Amino acid sequence: MEAELENICSYCSQLIHPAQQLTPDREHYPILEQLRDSSFTCVLCAFIWDFCQAEGVAMAFVNDDESSPNSLRIELTSTQIDGSQEPISGLSWDLVSMLISQDMATRSWSRCFTIASCSMNSLAADLPIWKRSKTSVPEKMSIVKNWLETCERCHETCKPRSQQLPKRLINVEPAVPRLVMCQELSKPSPKYATLSYCWGQSKFGATKESINSLHQGIPMDSIPSTLQDAILTTRMLGLRYLWIDSLCIVQDDELEWNIEASNMKNTYAGSSLTIAATDAIDSSEGFLNVHLHDEKALTTSETVHQPPFKEPFFRTLSSDGEQRTVRVLPHDFRTSIQDSALNQRGWVLQEMLLSPRIAHFAQTELSWHCKNSYRTETGLVLEPEQVLHTQRRADDHHMVWWNWMTSYSRRKFTVASDRLPALLGILDEYQSMTGDQPILGLWCGSFHQDLMWMRMKADSVTDESPFLGLPSWTWLSCRNMVRFDFWNWEKNTPKLRADVRDHVALVDWEVVWSAAPFSSAIASTRLAIRGPAREMTLRIKPKSPIRSPLILEVFGEQNCPENSVGRSFYDAQFDIDAKSYASFADYTCVLLRSMALLSSMKISETFLILQKTEGDSDVQLYRRVGIGCYHGSYRTFGSAGQKTLNLA
């Protein structure tokens, strides 16, 4: 469907490139009810209204007895996105931030969406996505094939980094594709694609019973839609081989699974292209969204899911009188991939980090990610680090690791026991960057800093008990999302001019696995740290505000309210449900890091909260139960003696 000429309201016209900053005397419709009325005549107001409805925000506010449509204020702020590596004349992207709040600002809701536009007089207007609302499958394949060929020709750093093949690949050339053993393939190693997708609830996979028949042929109508689409895509891109975990690994052969899982890092690092089913929530959904035997569907443009609300695609006159085609994307395009269904899956972080090239098939548009660039179907070209959490460019490598692990810890696994094997390739990647030695998700060189992980409250996690078999000091024992350096010292220190000191040293450690590391059970661990330690009797302060971290009450110390100017307080987050810590109990606390602001001499001290364990060991062991921080004007650990502690 071609873009039709639409009239938009005078407020929305200011959001189209060249966008004008909305001012207090020229703001958008300030009341939600006025926005709704305008939605009947303005296509962009209709999108904003539908956006609110789809998110449930309008009803959430209106159903509140204290709210009415007239009391809900709406604010929009437009920011043009710059930094394109290869600017194409006539194209623009504007990020619109939307805030809805009550008059008294007691409640608020915010989201972002993107307005992309293209001048009808520019060369970019010939791109397929600017001609029709949806591009056809052949057009998409032509775009991806061009990206792939350009990358292979021009990007030396994007070449596959591994020559170690998996055990099997799928030969997609025959009408009925089939599995082949890689050891039987001729040298040099063949080019192949890999698939990154969500399994969902699918139980499909190669088994000991079916593996021989799959070597004879894979009936296309017998496999889930996402796998079908991956085979079609590989064929249309001119590649002969494809690797899909569920087909190429015998799922009920534990020995083979462990071997292939440990080699998965090489499988993705050695692929010519990873095909990402970015928005498919499970393997039955597909990403081309066409019927397998419907040749008409392969050549028409209506090939993607309908979103929950209409995404505007129209022509209009901009403020400078130029006719432009406009596409509105219901998200911040810089975070759409990392917020996608695919990137909620645990294995995918490894796949994204190790793949030299990735083609993302999303509902709104195609995008391309390689080591050198990030490209979208609409013509945007950026540095990969501008949009993706897989960035590697940081002054301190441990900050990169923290970003990766924060992302990893929030992800879901179809099989909970995959949480350790899925980390193996990421560990190898980071070790190749730093030469450091891993200690169960922490690192020798930054161990004193890596201990500063904190559990974040996640309502979706119903079981908050630690993972069995994992020591308490590693964030891998925590079922929730974690964050490192929650109090932001790393980020704020250069601005604040502060004296920051680390106080804990790693004394001794050992991790013994029953078989291959991260693919088997942990047989035993030993870890000792040394630092300033003091005994504290504490509890969660009664009627503490519901937040993370919670306010602590320390027995024998005067704890003032959090918002008291110039006063001191403690806050903390426990590694399991805080209800267990509502009563006073004795703990051993070890100072990890202190910070003194040079301008005001305000002190912050971050400390581990440890509890003695009962057991038969001759050595007293301590179990980590949380992390806390003191905020005040004196050093609470100033007289604490050095102590060596063995952590369980």
Image (cartoon, grey):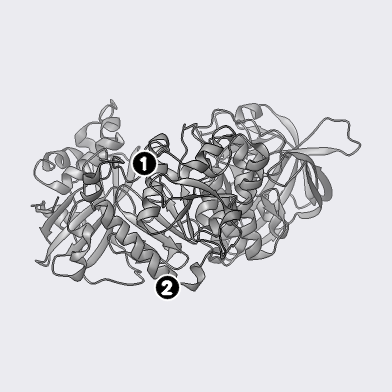
- Using the image as rendered, state which of residue 369 and residue 93 is in the foreground: 369
Compared to residue 592, the image places residue 18 above or below, namely below
Compared to residue 285, the image places residue 116 above or below, namely below
Q: Which quadrant of the structure image shows residue 20?
A: bottom left
| 600 relative position to 325: left or right | right
- Using the image as rendered, state which of residue 636 and residue 624 is in the foreground: 624
- Residue projecting furthest to the front: 216
Is the C-beta separation of discs 2 and 1 under 8 Å?
Answer: no
Q: Secondary structure at mark 1?
A: loop
- Using the image as rendered, state which of residue 270 and residue 177 is in the foreground: 177
The dot on residue 153 is 2
Amino acid type, mark 2? Arg
In three-dimensional space, the C-alpha distance between marks 2 and 1, rounded to whole angstroms, equals 30 Å
Compared to residue 315, the image places residue 250 above or below, namely above
Asked if one can make out residue 566 in the rendered structure from this viewpoint, the answer is no
Tag 2: Cα neighbours inside 10 Å, few (<14), some, or many (≥20)?
few
Q: Position of residue 134 (x, y in %)?
A: 22, 51
**Which residue is painted at 50% across and 42% down in the image?**
216
Tag 1: Cα neighbours inside 10 Å, few (<14), some, or many (≥20)?
many
Q: Position of residue 124 (x, y in %)?
A: 21, 67
| 276 relative position to 486: left or right | left
| 39 relative position to 467: left or right | left
Q: Secondary structure at mark 2?
A: helix
The dot on residue 401 is none
**Which residue is painted at 38% across and 54% down in the image?**
235
Q: Position of residue 198 (x, y in %)?
A: 46, 41
- Using the image as rendered, state which of residue 437 and residue 406 is in the foreground: 437
Badge 1 is on which residue? Answer: 286
The quarter of the image holding the C terminus is top right
